[in-house]
Structures are given as C-alpha cells and as structure tokens.
Image: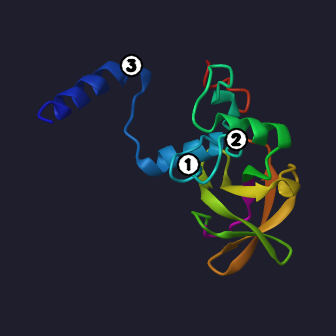
Amino acid sequence: MEYQRHLYDLLMEAGREFGIADFGYRALDSMRLEKAYRLWGADMSADYTPLEAGMDRFVDFDKGDFIGREALLRQREQGVERALACLVVDAADADPHAFEPVLAGEKIVGYVAAGGYGHTVGESIALAYLPTAYLEPGTQLTVAILGERRPAQVVEQPLYDPGNERLLS
C-alpha cells in the first residue's frame, strides 16, 4: 500500500506521451456497455449459462470433462431459451440502470441486467436477458423507467466498433 502513489506516478509518466488520463468507473461502465462487454454480477451470474450470456466462444468443450459440461452440451444441442440482448432505449432524461422490466406489449418478457448512457454512440443502452423470440435486431419493445414505458429496440451488439478495428489498431 505504501508504494501505491509511487506506482501511480510512474504509470502516469510512462503514459504521458500516449495521452494517458484518469477516468472513473462510470466512464468505464459506459464504454463496456457500448462494446457489450459482460460484467460478472450484473450481466453474468450463476443464474445464466455461458451460452445464454453469449460467451460460448470461451467454453472449450474439447478439453475434457468439467463441471456442467454435459448440461452445456445439451443446451447447445437444444438451443437456448433466452439470451443476453442489447437494446437502444429512447430514455429521455433517465437511462436504464438495472432491474427495469422489459415489455412486449403488456407482457413482461425480461429485466434489464445493466444499462446506462453510451457517450461515444450517443444512445441509452440496456443489456437484458430475453426469450429467443425477442432477440432479432429490430424487435420493438418497451422498458419501464421510473414508471414510464420508453420505446426500445433490439440491436446488433456491440454498438461501438463491432469489427474491433479500434481495439486492434
């Protein structure tokens, strides 16, 4: 702990030529929502499988036996019943945060896992687990924010830099 400030100063000096700057957690959260990066405890938990969370590319089914392998293989074969979707919300002056209901007509079909404003894309973003019938980009839904239903549309994810060109440049 006693070297924390010294380490910070060294990092800032080394990054000066690259334009290093301090940023806060809300900025980090905004950027991760734009890239649809999952966060344990918000978008991922023991309640959802890696297939439902869109993380199947990180599951090595060929590495041998592991806890849950057979259940995941069955789910992969049968298909998921729900998955994490990205929505753009016409949120007016209050962005979704978490646990707001997502509705199709009068029926609640899911809840926002995480949400906020994407400053780079200029949109209010919500990540929500939805039944497969509502996952198609362009699907029109509503999100209840502070008691008011706001129009929402399922979109391709990620919203920002889908080809990872910025990340890999």
Would you call the spot at circle 2 few (<14 residues within 10 Å), some (14-19), or many (20 or more)?
few
Q: In which quarter of the image is the N terminus?
A: top left
Would you call the spot at circle 1 few (<14 residues within 10 Å), some (14-19), or many (20 or more)?
many
**Circle 3 or circle 1, nearest the eye:** 1
Question: Residue under circle 3?
Answer: 17
Identify whether 140 is placed above or below 166.
below
Most extreme residue toward the left is: 2
Label 2, label 1: how far apart the Cα atoms are:
34 Å
- Camera-side residue of 123 and 110: 110
Which residue is pictured at 56% across the width and 43% down the height?
Answer: 31
- Camera-side residue of 146 and 66: 66
Range covered by the magenta-colored residues: 87-94
Quadrant in which residue 124 is drawn: bottom right
- Residue type indicated by callout 2: Ala
Give the image location of residue 140, x and y in percent. Answer: 86, 62
Q: Do the residues labelled 3 and 2 touch (CB within 8 Å)?
A: no
- Residue type indicated by callout 3: Glu
Q: Is residue 158 visible?
A: no
Quadrant in which residue 59 is drawn: top right
What is the secondary structure assignment of the residue under circle 1? helix
